[in-house]
Image: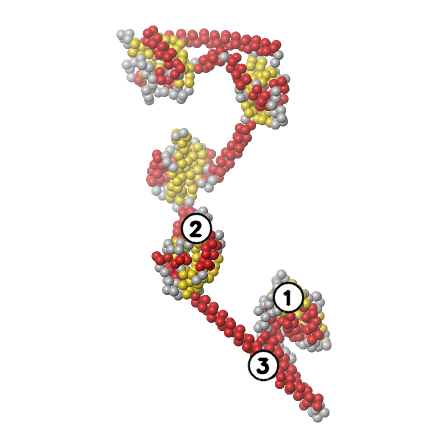
Amino acid sequence: MDSKQEIILLKKALERQKKARIQAEKILEIKSKELYDTSFHLKQANHKLESLLNKKTAALNGSFLDIIDPYVIMDLKANVINMNLSAKEFLGYDHTVEPVNLTQLVHKDYLDYTKESFQILIKAGTIKNYRAKIILKNKEERYVQINSSLIYDQDRKPIAAQGIIRDISQETEIKHLLAEQKKQLNIIVENSPLGIALTVKGKIIKANPSFCNLLGYSTNELKNQTIKDISEPVDSLDSTDKLVKMNDGEIDNFSCIRKYLRKDGSHLYAKTHISAVRNNQNEVEFQVTTIEDITKEMKAEEKLKASENRLSTLILNLQTGVLLENEDRKISLTNQLFCDLFQIPASPEQLIGADCVDAAEQNKSLFKNPDSFVARIEKILSDQVMVVSDELEMVDGRILERDYIPIFNNGEYKGHLWTYQDVTLSRNYNRTLEAQREKYSSIIANMNLGLIEVDNDDIIQMVNQSFCQMSAYSEQELLGKKAKEVINITDNTIINEKNQKRLEGKSDSYEIEVRDKNGSLKHWMISGAPRYNESGAIIGSIGIHLDITEQKLLQLEKLELVKELENSNKGLQEYAHIVSHDLKSPLRSIMALSTWMLEDYREVLDEAGQKNLQLMQDKIELMDNLISGILEYSTANSSNLVNSDIDLNCVVSDIIDSIYIPEHVTVAVPVKLPTVLADKTKIHQLFQNIIGNAVVHIEKEKGLVEVLCSETENYWQFTIKDNGVGIPEKYHTKIFEIFQSVGTNERSSGIGLSIVKKIVDRYNGRVWIDSQVGIGTNFHFTLQKIKNKQPVT
């Protein structure tokens, strides 16, 4: 700013000071007249008071009704004898409630001055324009002017003093402001944390350091810029409207929130206060703009609003009835659930401000014990101590749980919070749970399974009667003892391993051998699991014990029997081979002799003799097949399966080449068959028996046998399809039994399909047929896929 502008500003400031001084002198003239009138009024009141001092308080109060200013009567020691309503309201004290001494209200800086003034009053009888700072009851400091005079008795002896008090705080502040205006302005402008700018016709002509620092501009950079150039109002319509009103003289100042652009391009939100400085024509000569950075506050306010909204939403939607009362027992906040719990037809918003003083009496009929309900509320409110889980039983059978929380602020009671929760289901559940607990406790105590609970150190915490009977120990002998030290376990390493698993939170079942108290060997099956407390921490384990001694003995006997059976089967297999050899040897001899006889005596034997020899050979062949079939059947389940990769195409081809197939029958493989992992001999027997059975039971002119295959995830499924005579439905299951056959074919031994079923069973498959007489038969069977080549027993 150049020197000319500074001179202009100083002249204008001096002119404003002169105007202010003239205005102050006018105020003083007016106040002097008021003091004169007040003095005159005091003289008149003095005569009245001489006779009224001895009257009752009520009558005395009545005589002050026409005095508007605070008016006080005190004794000669400054103790208040009486005061009017204006004095009570201004000072905050009521002499009828508590003793009041006016010297105690005087600020410590004015005590000496007050003593001197009081002495002048005693000597002169009156005092005018006593000015001092006093402290009101609410701790507020005020400047007052007092005109006072003595009150005399009939002997003209002073007996009291009266005074009218006038609040001159504002006048005093104006006086001080006028005296120190320039100094204060400099301090404010240069040292204020608020940004301050002086504008003329919207252009900035001066800005304090805080204003520059907030926006990042220098003083020179801000000159000749307008507030509009560097900011925009958050509410443009409201700000523009107020600015128009200021220019029209309707308002002298207003506040708004503006968004300012910093030099670095960032933004800040500032609370902006704009004040007009007017000239004699009431035109705006200057505008003083102060800005306060409220960016953080704005963000905090946004968060606070969001938080308040969330809290309000939370309270309104809580599954707990909420009732907040202030210190006067007026409702400050409630929610819908509270209204629902007590069947209140009004909304929560309509209840705000409602008086709850008589609510308990009005609603006691809702409770099972009405008088107790009312008495309990009165006691809680009287004690003002937190109450939790207070239970209330309603007439309709509901059970409510009530909490009471008193609210204090700096030790001052400000109200209380009630919360109500319907715990009917919970209480009923707890009762049911308790009944169930008693029920199952009785079951546990009497069940045949032994139950034991131990802590993490293996110390026995609980046992039931069955466990005591199993171990032959009494409950007293077990409780508090280390389990593995009392129970004689054959292998303690198992228990140590299982206890470690429990600590890891794992459950499992296992068998142990123990000796009971009497030394008897027992076998127990134990199911063990970790025990947890309410916090989810492992505090031990629980074990359910089943005495399997008898089953174990039976199992051992079974193993012995199985071993004996295996030996017996082995012997039978050997015997079957021997018998097969011994039976087949004479059959082969008979077959040879019959063949020789038929060849040697063909010319001698007649047709009947030759036919009989041929019939004998057929029967011998049938007998040989029967013996072979019985041998295969006896070994179908006995030998191990030696699995290897078997190409079924080769197997079927070998079978076609080796078995008798009538000339009118064709065996076809429409699709390529898979290579399976299986026992070669068993698979060959399986396919040969089914294919061989199919080809000999076709009487049509052109017979066809097809070998088909399909695949699932775990199985191969095969179908041997023919167009033969078919099998009646009543034989569909029976044909898989040994020595069962259908039809009159003498070449059938009745064993082949029973061998098929045994082999399929060994591969965990199944075999079945679907057939229609005269149309044909489909033999289906499945084989489980084997993952490795290990022998299967």
Taking the spot 42% from the left edge, 52% from the top edge, the residue there is: 457
Please tell me in which quadrant of the rendered image residue 598 appears: bottom right
Question: Quadrant of the image for the N terminus?
Answer: top right
Query: Residue flagged by tag 2: what amino acid is it?
Result: Ile
Instruction: Please say whether residue 547 is visible from this viewpoint.
Output: no
Query: Residue flagged by tag 1: what amino acid is it?
Result: Leu
Place of residue 271 in the rendered image (x, y in percent of width and height, measured from the top left): 55, 24
Mark 2: few/some/many CA within 10 Å (<14, 14-19, 20+): some
Secondary structure beneath label 1? strand
Lower position in the chain sequence, tag 2 or tag 3:
2
Secondary structure beneath label 2? strand
Lower position in the chain sequence, tag 2 or tag 1:
2
Between the C-alphas of marks 3 and 1, the distance is 33 Å
Q: In this view, does 211 lie to the left or right of 311?
A: right
- Comparing 367 with 308, the one in front is 308
**What residue is shown with label 1?**
677
**What residue is shown with label 3?**
579
Q: In this view, does 149 lie above or below 410?
A: above
Q: Is residue 44 left or right of residue 713?
A: left
Question: Quadrant of the image for the C terminus?
Answer: bottom right
Mark 3: few/some/many CA within 10 Å (<14, 14-19, 20+): some
Query: Residue flagged by tag 3: what amino acid is it?
Result: Val
**What residue is shown with label 2?**
539
Q: How many labels does the image show?
A: 3
